[in-house]
Amino acid sequence: MSYIGNAPISAAFLTDTFSGTGSQTAYTMTVAPANTSSIIVAVTGVLQDPSTYSVSGTTLTFSAAPPSGTSNISVRYLGIPASGVTTTAYRTVTNTTATAGQTSFTIPSYTVGYVDVYRNGVYLPTSDYTATTGTTVVLTNAATAGDTITTISFYVSSVLNAIPTTGGTISGNLVVTGTETVPTITSPAATALTLQTNNGTTALNLTSAGYPLTPLRPAFRAYVGSNASVAQGGIVIFNTTTAVTNFNIGSNYSTSTGTFTAPVAGVYTFTFCVLWTGLTSGSSYMEAVLAVNGTAQASSGRMIYQANYNGYGSYAEVRLTAIANLASGDLVTVRNNSGATVTAYGGDSTWTWFGGYLVG
């Protein structure tokens, strides 16, 4: 028969076919239907009532195993979820009465390639107009006064940016509410999962065995490279770091000022060991304190002066481990709280050293 407009199209219903074994009850379908009423199931040509089977995702389960047969089970989909749909069109009809010689008509927004144009009810082929802007239609031949120009415009929204179910890349921020479940990963690769911040910086890696590898974990350990005189109340500058036992992850510790700057608010732990030497007065003592923003927070305790200790002169080793709840930007130092100017014994990473890290 004749028609006006686009040629009609048709498509067959999606159908799955399975072969029964006489014992098998579960079968895997091509797509996941919305529910049992979204499919028509027939066994050996006999239509099955939806109460005789159930659907979970792509799994079709019969309450009783269908009999053996080659392709004797038919599953016809009446509709499928929108996971395979790439476009959705919104249709708007606009009627405009033309003026003499008018060629350009402004219409509601449309996606280029999705607009039909009629002149006095007669469908115009695409060669009779231009529609490339998304908001206008321009006739090739000017209209006559009183002509009715009808446009049927379609605005198409894409769902191509849907999160892929089998892998892909998500750009921008992803907000997850509820419970997020990460499947078990058995890949032998060293890094199995990587989480990044919104600026692309790697924040967390997980190995295939589930061990966390956190590249941004503020931590440091430094030591005094050579003997250094420290005035009473002065900062001990641990000026040397190396790659193994001494390090500076995040570069938050300054080897030039002896100051650790907290990069984020949180609980930190600090440990130091200072080997003091140089006191000559038996009435004095040697001590070091952990200071935050210049104020002492914890003390190593005082070591009383003892001359010629084991024949090596005056030495005292003071130690401390403490935790601190810091704000971002707080400054942490080790200070000389001895009774006088003393010397921090240096030259070896095991003598006078300072370290710390973010607990969380």
Image: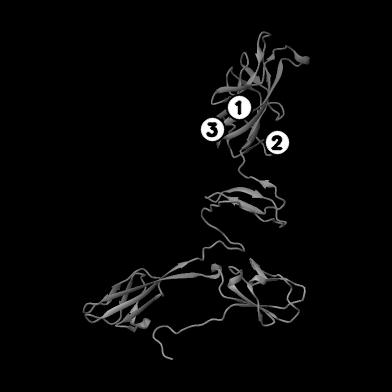
Labelled disc at residue 327:
3
Q: Position of residue 241 (x, y in %)?
A: 65, 34
Instruction: Rate crowding at label 3 as few (under 14), some (14 to 19) or many (20 or more) other CA atoms within 10 Å.
Output: some
Q: Quadrant of residue 353?
A: top right
- Disc 3 + disc 1, Cβ < 8 Å: no
- Position of the N terminus by quadrant: bottom left
Between 254 and 261, the one nearer to me in the picture: 261
Q: CA distance from mark 2 to mark 3?
A: 27 Å
User: Residue 330 — which label?
Assistant: none
**Mark 1 is on which residue type?**
Ile
The residue where tag 1 is placed is: 237
Examine the rendered structure and indicate whether residue 350 appears above or below residue 48: above
Residue 289 point in image, percent of width and height: 62, 22
Quarter of the image for residue 262 reads top right
- Residue 170: quarter of image: bottom right
Q: Position of residue 297 (x, y in %)?
A: 59, 23
Q: Amino acid at mark 2?
A: Thr
- Observer-side mark, 2 or 3, equals 3
Distance, label 3 to label 1, CA atoms, is 22 Å
Name the residue rendered at 77%, 76% in the picture.
22
Q: Mark 2 highlights which residue?
A: 245
Q: Secondary structure at mark 2?
A: loop
Give the CA distance from mark 1 to mark 2.
17 Å
Badge 2 or badge 3: first in the primary sequence: 2
